[in-house]
Image: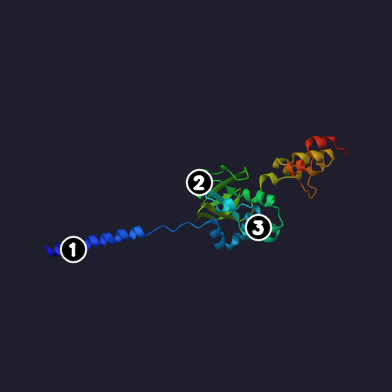
Amino acid sequence: MKHYKKIFIFCISIVLVFTACKKDKVAEPLPSLTEFINKNADVSIFNAAIEKAGLQTFKNGGGPFTWFMPTNTALQSIGITEDSVGRMTQGIASYFVTYHIVNARFSTQDMIALYSFPRTTLQSTAIYTGGDAGVFYVNGIKITSADNEVAGGLVHKIDKFMVPTQLVGNLQNMLTRTGQHTLFIAALTKAGKWTQLSGTTAFTVIAPTDAAMTSAGLTSTAITAATV
């Protein structure tokens, strides 16, 4: 009897130890986006753009967010470096960065289920995703490192920079699609310069937004009344 009693006590002890071990085993917390970026030097330029854009709230917020992050190689291939990011205005940096953020958790499993289905970015512009044979794409751009878990959502690294659709086409198309340059377009039309932007001739256009034009007193009434 004493022998069975010892076996019973021994078994109970094993169960208690096992239970205690299970309780002590706590899941590792997910890294913050900042921690992820610090461990992934290949997205440092995009991080510089996030900082320049003043989007720390999204960077450290609870989310969920899905970030499509072009690598340094992808950005450098089109001439974007940390130095050029530093020379951008906050508005320009924000315009580009928000096109790479979806205000939801969006994994590759969702991309399979929603092939060629649009998702809206923080810029309120659609992006399109899809997958084939285990390789996934966003706007036709390859996702090179998918489903990286962070505290605020997911990070997908991509091998090209996503150009907002508003900036595809000639200068007339670009200015029209932004929805923020109606007064500048009116001024160009008044000055007889608008038609010059419809072709393929290269121009550099410094385009003030409607807010900037209005703050300078260049309302639609003022533009109409102006003499050329």
Q: Which residue is mark 3?
A: 75
Spatial distance from mark 1 to mark 3, Cα to Cα?
A: 67 Å
Residue 134 on image: x %, y %: 51, 52
Q: Quadrant of the C terminus?
A: top right
| Mark 1 Cα shell of 10 Å, populated few (<14), some (14-19), many (≥20) | few
Q: Which residue is mark 1?
A: 7
Amino acid carrying label 1: it is Ile
Residue 155 quadrant: bottom right
Residue 194 on image: x %, y %: 81, 41
Camera-nearest residue between 169 and 19: 19
Q: Is residue 71 at all visible to an observer of this figure?
A: yes
At a point 19% along the width and 61% down the height, the residue shown is 8
Helix, strand or loop at label 1? It is: helix
Q: Quadrant of the N terminus?
A: bottom left
Measured along the vertical axis of the image, is residue 219 above or below residue 26? above
Camera-nearest residue between 23 and 134: 23
Q: Which residue is mark 2?
A: 110
Answer left or right for 218 relative to 124.
Answer: right
Circle nearer the N terminus (1, 2): 1
Amino acid carrying label 3: it is Leu
Point out the frontmost of discs 1 and 2.
1
Measured along the vertical axis of the image, is residue 111 above or below residue 1? above
Q: Is residue 79 at all visible to an observer of this figure?
A: no
Answer left or right for 66 relative to 168.
Answer: left
Circle nearer the N terminus (1, 3): 1
Amino acid carrying label 2: it is Asp
Residue 78 on image: x %, y %: 69, 57
Camera-nearest residue between 10 and 141: 10
At a point 81% along the width and 39% down the height, the residue shown is 189
At a point 75% along the width and 39% down the height, the residue shown is 182
Camera-nearest residue between 84 and 213: 213
